[in-house]
Image: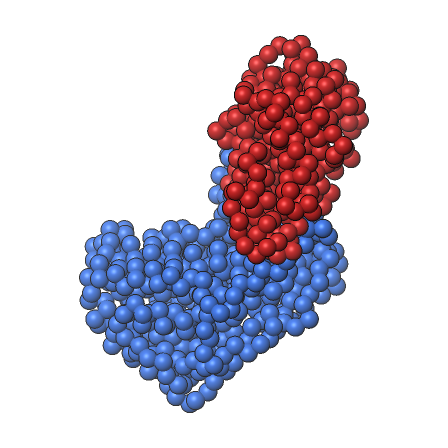
Chain colours: A red, B blue
C-alpha cells in the first residue's frame, strides 16, 4: 500500500473500504450555498492599486498553454518567448509561471525558456482522456520528466473514480508521483465537469492530496464545463482543510474557460478570502489558460497609459 | 485577514441621489408641513452627518392623513383589480429604474452596506410590488371566498432595519387588495419612504391612496389609536407591539404584528460545514444583525463544535467592516446611537454572566455608530444573551447532543419567528422542521426572502403573515 498519505491520514489509504469510508465521511457540499458564496465573492470591486496588483499577480500565475495536435517546435518556441517576456513594450511585466505542452514538445519548450524563471509543464498520462494502460501513462511521464519537465499535469481515471474504485485512482496517482520523483511537481487534473457533483469534486480533491498531489487542478479545458468559481472555491476549501489537518500545503489550478481579466480577478478574490495570502503566489495558485494572458496584458496597458489599445498591441501567440 | 492583496476603496457615488435639505409630510398627494411645525433631523449612522430635516407628524396630521385615505378609499377600492394592478406594476418598474438611487439613499440613511441595499433590499422591494400587482385582479381566486372586500384605511408602522423593504411588505398587499394607506416610517430612517412618496406621484397614483407620516413613537401611537383606521399593521419591537395590541383590543380594527425574534440556527454533525458557516454568517451578520429573524442563537452539535467554531472564527476574520457606501464592505454601521447602547449593554451583560466573548481583529471607524462582529461561546439557555433579542451583530453559541435536545432548546424561547436547520439528511430536515415553533424554518440556508413565501411569527414574535397568498388575508374582510 501507498505511503504517500501524510502520517496523520496514513490509515485512510490502507484499503478500498477505509478509503471509501473516509471520502464519503467528508462534509457534504450544498450546491446552492457554494454557488451563492462564489457569486458573492464575484461582486467584490477591485480597483486602482488593487487591480494593478491583481493583474501582475494573475500574469505571474498563468500557465501559458498550447495543447493542439498541430503543435510544432516553432509554435512552442514563440509561446516560450512570450512566457518569458509577455509584453515587449513594457519590460516591467512579470513572466508567466510556466508553459504547458505535450510531452514531445518538452525539449523545445525547455530551450525556449532557458535562463528564465518560467517552468515547463507537460500534460502526460494520456491527456486528455487518460484512457491508456498505467504502464503507458508512466512511460509518458518518464519521457516528459527526463526531457526536463518541471511539472507534470496528469489526468485521473474518471471511469475508475465514478465506478467507486478510489484505490485504483489513488494507486495511479502515487505511481505517477513516484515517476515524477523529486524533479517535477505533480498537478492532478480531475476533469470536474465529468465528475458531475460537488461532493465528487471534494472527494477527488482529498483523494488527490492523499496520493501526494502538489497541485489539484479542475480540468483539461477539453470538456464542456471547466473551471468555475464554485468548483475552484470548493477545491480551495479542500486544500485549506487538508493543510489544517496535515500541515501539507497543496496548490490549486483552475483551468479552461477563464478568458478575461475580470474573471481572473474574481478567482484571485476567491483565493484571497478563502485561503489568504499563503496561496497568493504562483507556487500555490495557477491559471490554466491560453487566451487569458492577452486580456491581462491589454488591461495592464490600459492601467499604465489610461487608454485602451487593442488586440494588435499584444502578440497573437 | 492581513494580505498583500489590499482592496482599494470602491465607494458608490453619492451623486446619484439628491437629498433635499428638508422634507414635509406626504398627505393627499402633496408634501406639506406638520400642523404644529415640528421637525426632526435624520443622520447618517456611519458618519453622524445630518442628511435632512424632516417634518414630524402630530395628531392633527394623522387625522388629516386618515381623512385623505378614507376619501381616496371609495374610488380606489371600487377600481377593477386590473386597474389597481397597473399602478402597482408601474411602481415596481419605477423602483427598478431608480434602484441605484434608492440603494445609495437607503445606505446613507440606514448605515447598512451598499452591497445589501443593492443586491437584497431593492430587488426584493421591486419583487414585492410585482408579486402583489399580480394578485390584484385574482383576489376571487385567492382562497378567501368569492369577492373578498378590502378593510378600508390601513395604519402601518414600520421599523428602521429594512426601511423600504418593510414599506413594500406593507403597502403592496394593502393596495393590491383595495385598501388605502397611512404609513409611519421610523424616525431614524424616514428618507426612502419620502422618496417612495415621490414614486407614487411619478406613477400617477390617485391622491390619498398612500400617505407617509414621518415621526416618533407618539405619531405611531396616534395613528394606531385613530378611530377611523380599520387595519393596523406593525413591524418592530415586542414591547411596542404589546402596547399596540392593548390599544387595538376591543376595537373592530384588524391587527397584524411582526415582532422580535431569537432565531435558532441548528447545525447537525452531518451538515455541509462550509455552507453552514456561510449561513451562520449570513444569519447573524446580515444587516449588522438588525434583523428580527436573525439566527442569533447558534445550536451546534457537540461533536463538531470545535471544528465549526474554528471555521467560523476564521471566516469572521475576513469580514470587512467600514464605509457602507464601499462596495466591498460586509458590515456597516449600527442604525443609531440608541441601538448601539442597547447592544453594548447586552454584550456587557453576557460577559458579566460568564459567557466568553470573541471578536476578530477589527478596526472601528472613529465617527458614527459601530460594533464589531461578536461571538459568544460557553453560553447556556439561562444566559440573558441566549434569551433577549440583541438586534446587533452578536451571536450566542450553544451546543446540543441529540436532535430532541436541539428542538427543545430551539423552542425554549419566548419568541418564534425563524429557525435554521443544517444537515445533509433530508428526513431529518423534515422531522426537525415539523417540531420547531417558528414561522419560518430555513434548511441549509438562512435569511432568504421571497415575496411568494409567507412570513410571520409564533408567541411573542407576533401574529399574522406577510408575503405570499397568506399576506392578502390580513388586508381582506374574510
Residue B435 visible in rendering: no
Above or below: residue B251 compared with residue B331: below
Residue B48, by quadrant, is bottom right
Residue B264 in percent (x, y) is at 57, 51
Q: Position of residue B339 (x, y in %)?
A: 60, 70
Residue ID at (57%, 56%): A306
- Residue sitting at x 20%, y 65%: B79
Vertical comparison of B291 with B49: above or below = above
Q: Residue A105: x, y in percent?
A: 64, 21
Q: Nearer the viewer, residue A48 or B56?
A: A48
> Please, which residue is most extreme toward the bottom here?
B36
**In the drawing, does residue B123 fall left or right of residue A99?**
left
Quadrant of res B91? bottom left
Q: How many marks?
A: 0
Nearest the camera: A212 or A130?
A130
Report the side of A274 relative to B37 (left or right): right
Residue B456: image quadrant is bottom left
The answer to whether residue B161 is visible is yes
Quick check: B251 left or right of A28?
left
The C terminus of chain B sits in image quarter: bottom left
- Residue A78 vertical placement versus B125 (above, below): above
Left or right for A176, reference B37: right
- Name which residue lies at 30% across and 67% down: B203
Residue found at x 43% / y 89% = B37
Query: At which x and y percent is residue B360?
Result: 71, 55
Amino acid at each position: 500500500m501507498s505511503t504517500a498519505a501524510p502520517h496523520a491520514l496514513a490509515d485512510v489509504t490502507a484499503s478500498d473500504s477505509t478509503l471509501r469510508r473516509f471520502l464519503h465521511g467528508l462534509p457534504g457540499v450544498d450546491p446552492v450555498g457554494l454557488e451563492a458564496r462564489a457569486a458573492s465573492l464575484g461582486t467584490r470591486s477591485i480597483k486602482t492599486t488593487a487591480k494593478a496588483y491583481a493583474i501582475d499577480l494573475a500574469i505571474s500565475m498563468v500557465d501559458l498553454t498550447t495543447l493542439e495536435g498541430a503543435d510544432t517546435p516553432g509554435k512552442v518556441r514563440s509561446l516560450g518567448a512570450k512566457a518569458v517576456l509577455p509584453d515587449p513594450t513594457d519590460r516591467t511585466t512579470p513572466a508567466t509561471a510556466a508553459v504547458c505542452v505535450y510531452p514531445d514538445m518538452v525539449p523545445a519548450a525547455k530551450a525556449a525558456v532557458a535562463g528564465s524563471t518560467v517552468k515547463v509543464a507537460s500534460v502526460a498520462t494520456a491527456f486528455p482522456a487518460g484512457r491508456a494502460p498505467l504502464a503507458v501513462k508512466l512511460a509518458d511521464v518518464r519521457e516528459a520528466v527526463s526531457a526536463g519537465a518541471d511539472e507534470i499535469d496528469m489526468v485521473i481515471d474518471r471511469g475508475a473514480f465514478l465506478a467507486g474504485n478510489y484505490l485504483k485512482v489513488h494507486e495511479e496517482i502515487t505511481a505517477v508521483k513516484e515517476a515524477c520523483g523529486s524533479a517535477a511537481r505533480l498537478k492532478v487534473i480531475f476533469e470536474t465537469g465529468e465528475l458531475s457533483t460537488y461532493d465528487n469534486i471534494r472527494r477527488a480533491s482529498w483523494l488527490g492530496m492523499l496520493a501526494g498531489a502538489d497541485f489539484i487542478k479542475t480540468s483539461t479545458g477539453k470538456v464542456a464545463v471547466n473551471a468555475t468559481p464554485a468548483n475552484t472555491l470548493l477545491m480551495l476549501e479542500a486544500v485549506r482543510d487538508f493543510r489544517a489537518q496535515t500541515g501539507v500545503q497543496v496548490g490549486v489550478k483552475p483551468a479552461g474557460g477563464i478568458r478575461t481579466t475580470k474573471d481572473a480577478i474574481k478567482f484571485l478574490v476567491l483565493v484571497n478570502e478563502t485561503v489568504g495570502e499563503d496561496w497568493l503566489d504562483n507556487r500555490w495558485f495557477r491559471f490554466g489558460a491560453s487566451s487569458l494572458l492577452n486580456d491581462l496584458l491589454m488591461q495592464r496597458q490600459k492601467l499604465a497609459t489610461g487608454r485602451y489599445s487593442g488586440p494588435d498591441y499584444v502578440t497573437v501567440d | 485577514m492581513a494580505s498583500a492583496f489590499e482592496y482599494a476603496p470602491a465607494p458608490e457615488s453619492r451623486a446619484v441621489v439628491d437629498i433635499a435639505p428638508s422634507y414635509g409630510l406626504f398627505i393627499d398627494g402633496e408634501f406639506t408641513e406638520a400642523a404644529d411645525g415640528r421637525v426632526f433631523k435624520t443622520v447618517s449612522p456611519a458618519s453622524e452627518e445630518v442628511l435632512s430635516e424632516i417634518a414630524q407628524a402630530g395628531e392633527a396630521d394623522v387625522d388629516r392623513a386618515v381623512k385623505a385615505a378614507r376619501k381616496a378609499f371609495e374610488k380606489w377600492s371600487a377600481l377593477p383589480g386590473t386597474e389597481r394592478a397597473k399602478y402597482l406594476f408601474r411602481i415596481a418598474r419605477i423602483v427598478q429604474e431608480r434602484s441605484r438611487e434608492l440603494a445609495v439613499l437607503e445606505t446613507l440613511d440606514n448605515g447598512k452596506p451598499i452591497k445589501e441595499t443593492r443586491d437584497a433590499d431593492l430587488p426584493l422591494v421591486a419583487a414585492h410590488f410585482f408579486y402583489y400587482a399580480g394578485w390584484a385582479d385574482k383576489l376571487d381566486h385567492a382562497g378567501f371566498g368569492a369577492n373578498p372586500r378590502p378593510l378600508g384605511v390601513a395604519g402601518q408602522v414600520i421599523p428602521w432595519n429594512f426601511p423600504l423593504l418593510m414599506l413594500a411588505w406593507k403597502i403592496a398587499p394593502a393596495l393590491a387588495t383595495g385598501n388605502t394607506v397611512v404609513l409611519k416610517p421610523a424616525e431614524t430612517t424616514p428618507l426612502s419612504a419620502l422618496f417612495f412618496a415621490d414614486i407614487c406621484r411619478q406613477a400617477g397614483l390617485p391622491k390619498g391612496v398612500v400617505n407617509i407620516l414621518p415621526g416618533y413613537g407618539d405619531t405611531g401611537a396616534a395613528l394606531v389609536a385613530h378611530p377611523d383606521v380599520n387595519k393596523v399593521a406593525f413591524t418592530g419591537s415586542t414591547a411596542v407591539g404589546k402596547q399596540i395590541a392593548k390599544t387595538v383590543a376591543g376595537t373592530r380594527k384588524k391587527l397584524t404584528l411582526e415582532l422580535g425574534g431569537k432565531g435558532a440556527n441548528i447545525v447537525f454533525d452531518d451538515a455541509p460545514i462550509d455552507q453552514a458557516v456561510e449561513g451562520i454568517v449570513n444569519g447573524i451578520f446580515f444587516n449588522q444583525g438588525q434583523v428580527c429573524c436573525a439566527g442569533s442563537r447558534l445550536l451546534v452539535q457537540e461533536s463538531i463544535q470545535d471544528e465549526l467554531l474554528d471555521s467560523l472564527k476564521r471566516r469572521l476574520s475576513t469580514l470587512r467592516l467600514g464605509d457602507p457606501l464601499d462596495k466591498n464592505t460586509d458590515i456597516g454601521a449600527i442604525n443609531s446611537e440608541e441601538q448601539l447602547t442597547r447592544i453594548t449593554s447586552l454584550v456587557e451583560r453576557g460577559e458579566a454572566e460568564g459567557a466568553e466573548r470573541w471578536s476578530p481583529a477589527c478596526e472601528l471607524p472613529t465617527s458614527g455608530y459601530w460594533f464589531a462582529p461578536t461571538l459568544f461561546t460557553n453560553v447556556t439557555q439561562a444566559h440573558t444573551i441566549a434569551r433577549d433579542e440583541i438586534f446587533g451583530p452578536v451571536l450566542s453559541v450553544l451546543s446540543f447532543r441529540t436532535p430532541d435536545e436541539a428542538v427543545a432548546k430551539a423552542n425554549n424561547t419566548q419568541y418564534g419567528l425563524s429557525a435554521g436547520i443544517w444537515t445533509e439528511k433530508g428526513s431529518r430536515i423534515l422531522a426537525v422542521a415539523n417540531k420547531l415553533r417558528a414561522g419560518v424554518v430555513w434548511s441549509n440556508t438562512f435569511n432568504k426572502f421571497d415575496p411568494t413565501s409567507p412570513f410571520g411569527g409564533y408567541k411573542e414574535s407576533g401574529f399574522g403573515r406577510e408575503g405570499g397568498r397568506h399576506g392578502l388575508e390580513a388586508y381582506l374582510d374574510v
